[in-house]
């Protein structure tokens, strides 16, 4: 589906739901097969958590009236789902957003309405997801930002709206990720900062405005990343970290060696 057609369908969906009164589903709901989706037709919110873990699901369009999830939104282990377009009306998630192990998922455009995530944001274990462009409306993450083992992910530009991470920031084992430029708005990380096992990552320029990382800082096992990049990052921090772990990156000559680098 091209992007113009997607946004036209989004407009039609919004119009279809606009005359409905607020209709909340009370409690948690699990979608385990395609027929479960229709149970939530017309609902505008869920008071608890919504879990989409469906081996056969291909279409979430009947969820198009949803605007909020009170607790967690989890989308994991969906074998046939290629997009999340049916979730395009959601603007807020009270707790954590988890997107994990969706082998056919190619994009996150269906989450483009989300502006608020009260808890963490986890994106993990995808083979076809190449970018995070549908997440550009999110400005803060109330928990941990965790990006791990996304084999086709080339950039984090879809996170360019982020300015703060209230707990930890972890970028691990993303084989074709070349830069962190999508994180260029983040000024503080309240927990640990870990960048590890990213095979072709060459620089940390995307963290250029980061001034604090309050717990440990771990930059390790990034074979294309010069040690100097990690050392320069340490020098720019004005607060933290409590522990420093910089090793098994690309050995280079830091002259002079930044004061904070082990």
Image (cartoon, grey):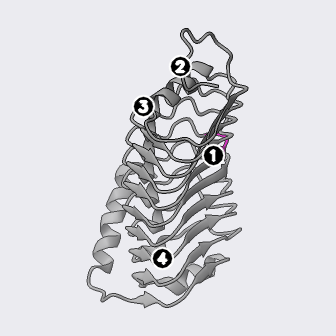
Find disc 4 in the rendering and name its residue: 62
Pair 4/1: label in front? 1
Label 2's element? Answer: loop
Lower sequence index among marks 2 and 1: 1
Give above or below for 88 relative to 25. Answer: above
Residue 236 seen in render: yes
Percent from the top left, x then y, of residue 183? 45, 40
Percent from the top left, x then y, of residue 108? 49, 54
Q: Residues within 10 Å of mark 2 (few under 14, many from 20)?
A: some
Residue depicted at x 45% and y 73%: 94
Find disc 1 in the rendering and name its residue: 128
Find disc 3 in the rendering and name its residue: 208
Marks 4 and 1 sit apart, C-alpha to C-alpha, by 24 Å
Magenta segment, which residues? 148-152
Residue depicted at x 36% and y 61%: 115
Q: Residues within 10 Å of mark 4 (few under 14, many from 20)?
A: some
Marks 3 and 2 sit apart, C-alpha to C-alpha, by 16 Å
Find disc 2 in the rendering and name its residue: 258
Label 1's element? Answer: loop
Give above or below for 258 relative to 66. Answer: above
- From the viewer's side, name the closer residue of 9 and 220: 220
Marks 1 and 3 sit apart, C-alpha to C-alpha, by 29 Å
The label number, if any, that marks residue 229 in the structure image:
none
Lower sequence index among marks 1 and 3: 1
**Quadrant in which residue 246 is drawn:** top right
| Cβ–Cβ under 8 Å for marks 2 and 1 | no
Pair 2/1: label in front? 2
Marks 2 and 1 sit apart, C-alpha to C-alpha, by 39 Å
């Amino acid at each position: 589906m091209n992007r113009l057609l997607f946004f036209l369908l989004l407009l039609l969906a919004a119009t279809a739901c606009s005359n409905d009164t607020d209709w909340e589903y009370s409690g948690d709901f699990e979608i385990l097969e395609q027929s479960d989706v229709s149970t939530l037709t017309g609902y505008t919110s869920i008071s608890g958590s919504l879990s989409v873990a469906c081996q056969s699901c291909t279409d979430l369009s009947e969820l198009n009236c949803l605007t909020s999830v009170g607790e967690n939104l989890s989308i994991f282990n969906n074998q046939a789902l290629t997009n999340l377009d049916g979730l395009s009306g959601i603007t807020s998630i009270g707790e954590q957003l988890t997107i994990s192990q969706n082998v056919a998922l190619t994009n996150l455009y269906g989450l483009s309405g989300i502006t608020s995530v009260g808890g963490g944001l986890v994106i993990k274990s995808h083979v076809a997801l190449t970018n995070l462009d549908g997440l550009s409306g999110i400005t803060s993450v109330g928990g941990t930002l965790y990006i791990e083992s996304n084999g086709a992910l080339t950039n984090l530009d879809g996170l360019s709206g982020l300015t703060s991470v209230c707990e930890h920031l972890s970028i691990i084992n993303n084989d074709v990720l070349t830069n962190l430029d999508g994180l260029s708005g983040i000024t503080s990380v309240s927990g640990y900062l870990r960048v590890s096992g990213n095979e072709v990552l060459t620089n940390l320029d995307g963290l250029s405005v980061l001034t604090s990382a309050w717990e440990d800082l771990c930059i390790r096992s990034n074979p294309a990343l010069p040690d100097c990049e990690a050392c320069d990052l340490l020098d720019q921090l004005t607060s933290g970290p409590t522990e420093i772990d910089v090793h098994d990156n690309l050995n280079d000559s830091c002259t002079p060696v930044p004061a904070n680098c082990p």
